[in-house]
Amino acid sequence: MVRWREKANKFQLSIMNRNVTSIDVAKRAGVSQSTVSRVFSSGSPNVSSEVRERVLQASLELGYRPNAIARMMSTRQTNIVGILMATITSPFYPYVLEKFLKELQAIDRQVLLFTASENQSVDDLLPLALQYQVDALIITSATLSSEAAAATSSGGTPVILFNRVVSDANVCSVCADNLAGGRLAADVLLDSGHEKLAFIAGIENTSTSQDRERGFALRLHERGMANWVRRAGRYTYESGYAAAQSLLDETVPPDAIFCANDIMAIGAIDGLRARGVRVPDDVSVIGFDDIPMAAWGAYNLTTISQEVDQMIQQTISLMLERIESPHEPCRTERVAGKLVIRSSVRNLTTGKSDDIAG
Amino acid sequence: MVRWREKANKFQLSIMNRNVTSIDVAKRAGVSQSTVSRVFSSGSPNVSSEVRERVLQASLELGYRPNAIARMMSTRQTNIVGILMATITSPFYPYVLEKFLKELQAIDRQVLLFTASENQSVDDLLPLALQYQVDALIITSATLSSEAAAATSSGGTPVILFNRVVSDANVCSVCADNLAGGRLAADVLLDSGHEKLAFIAGIENTSTSQDRERGFALRLHERGMANWVRRAGRYTYESGYAAAQSLLDETVPPDAIFCANDIMAIGAIDGLRARGVRVPDDVSVIGFDDIPMAAWGAYNLTTISQEVDQMIQQTISLMLERIESPHEPCRTERVAGKLVIRSSVRNLTTGKSDDIAG
DNA sequence: TTGAAAGCGCTACCAA
DNA sequence: TTGGTAGCGCTTTCAA
């Protein structure tokens, strides 16, 4: 008796004990295991309130929580979404990740997160992620070969690319309208009277950088501006810094630089200033993304936003759609960005330019 | 025959099909299901190479991969680590997360990531994470009540706090030596001849900010400096910006500010500059963390680093230890930071100061 | 409204 | 070296 009391007390302490199963609860509550399961199943099915109470009480005493793994096993549904992200540290992505997590948690999906190391391609990570029977896979800041994408999709797990596109009918994607964004940058720079333009690219084989450049180039061509220059960057501060300085060595240095993302634009500004070049008085700089740092007082970067919240919403809808009906034809959704005017492009400033966050 | 070939080809295409089980493979290879399991089990146990070949071939043809959920079910081991992170977007944490992922993936652990929304305390997230039978839980940038921590630990799942401490013998933690860091900041500022010091705190109930302030205050006291001022921030750029400006309204404004993290220090610098105050000529600023942005040309922030890589290594060792022997007594490990000298503190600059932005 | 029993896809033990 | 078989902890029929 005393022994039993001690035991009970001990159990009270442990809010959750991973070794307690529904059978233990059933015994203690004097009901069948099926009944315990019913009490904890989502639809709250037919269980008399008297029995439910007893089961809940027993669960509390024992520190019982249903084993999610076992539940997955019998429902053949994990409610887990895999997210595959290569560079979390690139300032645009932490926000994306946080937002995805919140939205997914809100619809009772958990997130299994994978990241690709340098020596490991995303293609290799795919089979791994798939072994966990994820309901869907969201791939972000990583390039997937179209073969791998197709193979995966045909295996029955929906794959959605975020901010990347791949030319395969079996892979959905949501991304910013990078082509339009590139055109917009060209117009902004030309309209404000710049005459020698430059572009600093991101990693060359990313669709994002390619499309931004293509839109930019196309629009410049349309408006009769042929001689612009380019440099290759790697989406990093340092590469933007170096590329901007190298641009200064042109026979006729540019008077405006369009960077494939904000972080390179910020690097570019610092690179230019380190050489005594004023921004925007001597050289204008425009970025892409509108990360928080773009609003920092030292930069006040004029840029083209990515409407992240909207993009994420659409990604999740698309995902849910494809979980429902995996064999519908795929589509790519493009979300238009907006021009965010701060003060790194001259002759463009709207009113007072202390657009400082805070 | 032709039919068969077609089928085989089709199967070759599907790199992975989630509906194929080991029984299907067994049938096709003409072996028992146990044998298939053996071929895919980690220890590569006794299977003749002839049979192994046949099984592998069949698996390839069918697009088979072992179901990780089922494996967890029978081994009663998930190899999943839960990471609980409140603010991924705070610039220090993306790097932490990426590093954790890489290290954990390297030892064949997957990561289930949870984030706490504003309306959701970490304590509420705990039972959820635990349902997934994670091998361990790493809690970062979030404050856990000691009751919840204790309850969880006693439930059998090791909990390790990263960069937070809680006064409970059942919870391990790894964090920077914030006390020593605070002292160091005091010494640096005093040694370089500053006379009116200020501190901008982070979120008040975080051990991180408390310890940094305590170390700072203690050291100032030891060196006979009593009249320093403080402001409360929220670890954000905006709060640093505002706090610094408010500090300017003191009857005797400070000539040096110690900020509880880098992002507030950067905000502070911009806030000061926006008021025409020069850094470091008029006011010196020192931060804590050494995030990448601290090295950006516009700020060149002198700061105290957190040795993240080392902290993560230790967290993982500690975790592995506790997975092995969950009932060993807990400990808190503190990792000393280093002074990183750039040019936001005067009379301290080593080498050339290319602090340009104004 | 409740209970019994058959799986979910794997691992691991025991026999052969 | 292989195959048979008993679980892992749950959900979900089907009967009572």
Image: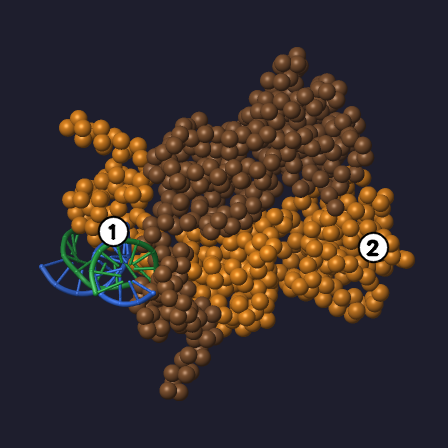
Chain colours: A brown, B orange, C blue, D green
Which residue position holds label 1? Answer: B37
Q: As drawn, is A77 to the left or to the right of A97?
A: left
Q: Quick check: marks 1 and 2 in contact, CB under 8 Å?
A: no
Which residue position holds label 2? Answer: B247
Q: Nearer the viewer, residue A253 or A211?
A: A211
Q: As drawn, is A296 to the left or to the right of B251?
A: left
Task: Determine the secondary structure under disc 1.
Answer: helix
Q: The residue under label 2 is which amino acid type?
A: Leu
The chain holding disc 1 is B
Q: Nearer the viewer, residue A150 or B253?
A: A150
Task: Determine the secondary structure under disc 2.
Answer: helix
Image quadrant in which you'd find residue A51:
bottom left
Q: Which residue: 44% across, 45% down?
A: A82
Q: Residues within 10 Å of mark 1 (few under 14, many from 20)?
A: some
Q: As drawn, is A206 to the left or to the right of B233?
A: left
Q: Which residue: 53% across, 67% down?
A: B149
| Quarter of the rendering occupied by the N terminus of chain A | bottom left
Q: State whether residue A164 appears in this view.
A: no
Residue B26's x, y, as percent? 20, 46
Which residue is at the far top? Answer: A224
Q: The residue under label 1 is which amino acid type?
A: Ser
Q: Which residue: 41% across, 28% down?
A: A168
Q: State whether residue B254 appears in this view.
A: yes
Is residue B73 placed above or below A168 in the rendered structure? below
Residue A154's x, y, as percent? 34, 35
Q: Which residue: 68% across, 54% down?
A: B235
Q: Which mark is residue A198?
A: none
